[in-house]
Image: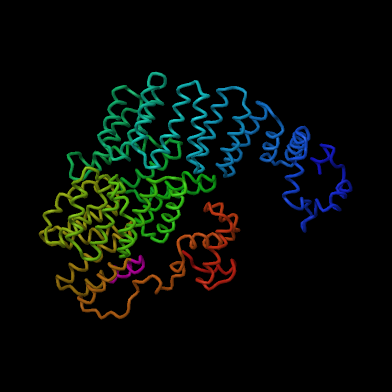
Amino acid sequence: MKAAGRSGAAASIDDLEPAERAGLLRTTSDGRLEVRHPLIRTAAVREATLGLRLAAHRALAEAYLERGDVCHHAWHLARSVTEPDEHVAAVLERTAETERNAGGNAAVAAMYEAAADLTPDQAERGRRLAAAARASADAGLPERAVELAARAEADLPDPLARAELTLIRASLADEQDRAGDAHRLFAETAASVTRLDPRTSGYLYFQAAAAAANAGDFAAMDGIAAEGVRLGVPNAPHLRALSRVFAGQNPLADADPADGVAALRELMDAMGACYAPRDRIRAGMWHLMIGDVRGAAEVAADLERRFRDRGAIGLLAPVLMLRTRTDLMLGRFRDALTGATEGARIATDTGQHRIRVYLDTSLGQLAAIQGDEERCLELTEEALSRGLPPSNVHAAAARSLLDLGLGRYEAALERLADVVAGPTRQGAIAALPDMVEAAVRAGVPERARDAAVWHADWAAQTQQPWAQAVAARCAALLATDDPDPLYSKALDLHREGGTPFEQARTELLYGEFLRRSRRRNDARARLHAALEAFERLGAAPWTERARTELRAAGESLTGGRDDPTARDDLAARLTPQELQVTRLAATGLSNREIGAQLFLSPRTVGYHLYKAYPKLGVTTRAALARLDLG
């Protein structure tokens, strides 16, 4: 009414009576006035003259401003002008930043683009288009981001400002499985601005080297790093450190794994003040590379919360990649399943192919632990066919873990030996303990001694108890004298926390050794601990191995609980997405609020609840809150 009054259309409710009688307007149950049908509104707008439409937008802009609704104020203000207007453009920009804090990167991008269209100055227009491109990338709109970046580049005379656009285009190319294009674009742009701004140049050289590593082109990575060092960019030590990191990640190579860990620590210290979201995700992955699983989990949880709050769907899949890997290592298999499933869906929708393949290998590892051979093979096929690290290494490790669990030791050993000796073995450290166990069980322990030494050196440098526990377990497997002290040491270290699946494997191996040593009572204690852990984790092949050992130790076992649906486990009845939705619904969130968190439509949320309720034996949201859906 206020807006209508300003435009002279109506001064009071009585003035609206003719329209109500004609059936054009109606009053809703909550007292609001609305147009009876959208076509009436469309016809009214189209029939109005340009002057009337502009006046209506001005009146609405003022009315919304009085109500404190800056978003609608800005949009109506933008529609009230017909030519560039810096005042209106500035209002849109300020409102865009307000929307960013409120959690809407897509809206931020739209407002910055609208602001750019109304900007008289060419350089300012380019700056605002660049901001729109960044927001589009974060919102998971890669094609739109690239288009806006191209428009911005045409308006930006400053080479440094154009260089910042490279970060958008090249980062998207990297995530879309075009890492080779990405590292060339980064490197070319870095070289073009070295004299203008060595710091920006050095940052771009670092991004180029990291993208080359993602492409599996470690020679190009070293060459890019060497070029940055030759030019004397300020972050030259970080470029050298990056080369040392990946050299140290190559098992059985000439490089020292201790130096690789030291280089990672240098980079993590240097990244402490970093504010770029993708750099923060990379720093989280570095935590994993030095065995700091809980540190990586904390980074992932913090970033996931921020990205969901801001509607940054383009950043969510990469952070779910990090979170899933930490969940797997921490034994949170259900969370790993839901996170990887959601991340793969988002990565598919946003064209982040490299991220999707990585997430598939994480799901493949989970399938391997559970003994689901068909699913493991399916989820790891693409990564193996691409041959790009670390996904191909994770895929091979998942298949080898499957073989190990099913007793196919020679197959596991040969595959892992190929991985360790291959040219793209980034990330193979985690698979070395499996290689040791496979070699020992295959009767050729000498084939794994170098791997055990390399892993022990790495574990010693990480100073992570779980990693040192696994190293002690490997040493026990290869021991030529009494391995008892090494197994005991491994379990003491495991008890400091970390990785439940690895601890259960140590319990199983120790129990097997004790049984063979005719210490049956001691063996049963260890084997029961392993059995309970494997059952809890749903690791079916390993559960059966523990049962077999217990029977061999003289224990009579009846029944089995390796099938998760046989347990009193409500969450196991649900699909990953149903579980996510019901967990949020149990907290009291509406369908719309849940959809905003998971980037789903409210209708899709309702469908998942409709499917989940019968499985859980409930009919209301209130009942969900009383269930254990952990």
Q: Is residue 13 left or right of residue 578?
A: right
Determine if the magenta segment contains residue 533: yes
Q: Is residue 302 left or right of residue 562?
A: right
**In the image as oriented, which residue stretches furthest toward the top?**
195
Q: Residue at x 27, y 44 (%)?
A: 426
* Whether residue 303 is visible: no
Magenta stretch?
Answer: 528-538
What colouring method underlies this structural image? rainbow
Q: Is residue 166 left or right of residue 431?
A: right
Given residues 195 and 146, the one toward you in this image is 146
Residue 392 on image: x %, y %: 29, 49
Given residues 228 and 469, the one toward you in this image is 228
Q: Number of labelled discs?
A: 0
Q: Residue at x 53, y 24 (%)?
A: 155
- Residue 594 sits in quarter: bottom right
Q: Residue at x 59, y 30 (%)?
A: 116
Most common SS among magenta residues: helix
* Whether residue 202 is visible: yes
Determine if the magenta segment contains residue 83: no
Q: Which quarter of the figure is the N terminus placed in?
A: top right
Residue 536 on image: x %, y %: 36, 67
Please, is residue 552 above or below residue 480 in the view? below
Residue 457 on image: x %, y %: 21, 46
Residue 181 on image: x %, y %: 36, 35
